[in-house]
Image (cartoon, helix red, strand yellow):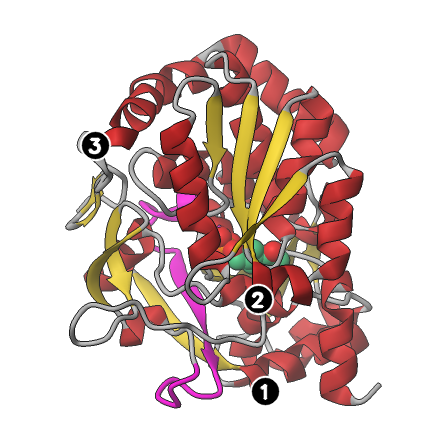
Amino acid sequence: MSYHVNEKGYYGEFGGAFIPEMLYPNVEELRQQYLKVMDEPSFKEEFNQLLKDYVGRPSPLYFAKRMSEKYGAKIYLKREDLNHTGAHKINNTIGQILMAKRLGKTRIIAETGAGQHGVATATVCALMGLECIVYMGEIDIARQAPNVARMKMLGAEVRPALSGSRTLKDATNEAIRDWINNPVNTHYIIGSAIGPHPYPDMVTRFQSVISAEIKTQLKEKEGRENPDYVVACIGGGSNAAGTFYHFLDEEEVGIIAVEAAGKGVHSGESAATSVLGHKGIIHGCKTLLMQTDDGQITEPYSISAGLDYPGVGPMHSHLYATGRAEFKAITDADAMKAGLELCKLEGIIPAIETSHALAIFENTKFKPDDIIVVALSGRGDKDLNTYIDYFGL
Ligand SMILES: *Cc1c(COP(=O)(O)O)cnc(C)c1O
């Protein structure tokens, strides 16, 4: 069984590149070049240098002592929250901006929902002096004012998506439209392990620095590279893909993927894609997707803006279908509780996305000597208002 992408861009029956003909030259250029470029010594050197000096990698692998005592297992946190801009997303945008430069592109476009990927993209565009246009739903622009301000300060233009539900999926449609109209000079930086091939694989490879570091760091701390479990939350699935990547073929490592159950998996307000989803095509990719019987995409819901994507990356659909990964769905309430608990137990305020991954300990039995590595995908500063409203702080 292979858990990696094949020549045609498929993970099992998921993936591929379902794109309008107008987009074909752009995607095809990227498909032909991405592995070659990533393999160039000068590319690797520049990527690794920036990850070290600009992002602050390697991110620590922290043994969470009090949390471990509480849950009776050895829990390690991979501290992506300590990266520049506060989450794992910068690993991918650094990789893609270098890719864009190698391909001779001078103009960058991106989509963003809550604004985290928009900020990470605006950041690397400032770093490289490239033009940056970020598409964002009109509703999200109103909801996420601080991130809109950040993007503007970093020199990006934020363009509102005015169609449909005026949220992430509509922003993505606008970005794709832009790319069709500007095929020669523009690179589209997609923010998760989604989209047409080669994006899911390219994003996964850039994020795989997470699991590469876990191996080295765990070897130092525990004398072995492989934990018993790796755990990560899933929106589109990029922090999870990076956290799982180097363990996919290590059968003794259990993989746990955590989705947002919102107000309950079957409440009608959820983003538990693996349970509720059916095969369909979204943003150029065949994957599990929340949709109505006649194939209309269902609006997802989660208290965390980063998890409410109606689909999931094709690698994760394959991990679900093959049973290689165990999928769990965590409600808003359980996530919020786990987030506050991490604050009190370890002095770390996590992003609400991450809080979903942390919440599994309440209902999952581990053995006392089990080593579990949780991807702490981001810090909670951006979620302060949600925490304040929820807990009445
Ligand atoms: C965006 C985001 C996520 C969800 O995105 P993935 O691509 O699934 O990783 C999770 N955590 C944080 C902190 C985020 O900003």
Ligand 1 has an atom within 8 Å of the beta carbon of the residue at disc 2: no
**Cα–Cα span, label 3 and label 1:** 44 Å
Label 3: which residue?
21
Give the residue at x 44% y 46%.
174
Q: Nearer the viewer, residue 169 or 344?
A: 169
Q: Amino acid at mark 1?
A: Ala
Q: Amino acid at mark 2?
A: Ala
Decide if residue 213 is in sight here: no
Q: Position of residue 392 (x, y in %)?
A: 80, 89
**Cα–Cα span, label 2 and label 1:** 15 Å
Q: Amino acid at mark 3?
A: Glu
Q: Position of residue 349 (x, y in %)?
A: 76, 67
Decide if residue 131 is in sight here: yes
Name the side, left or right, on which 346 lies relative to 190: right
**Cα–Cα span, label 2 and label 3:** 32 Å
Judged by depth in the image, the label closer to the viewer, 3 or 1, is 3
Does residue 247 belong to the magenta stretch? Answer: yes
Label 1: which residue?
333
Label 2: state its secondary structure: helix
Label 2: which residue?
305
Specify which label sits upstream in the sequence, 2 or 1. 2
Magenta-drawn segment = 243-269
Q: Nearer the viewer, residue 201 or 208?
A: 201
Q: Residues within 10 Å of mark 2 (few under 14, many from 20)?
A: some
Name the side, left or right, on which 160 lies relative to 31: right
Quadrant in the rendering for residue 20: top left
Judged by depth in the image, the label closer to the viewer, 2 or 3, is 3
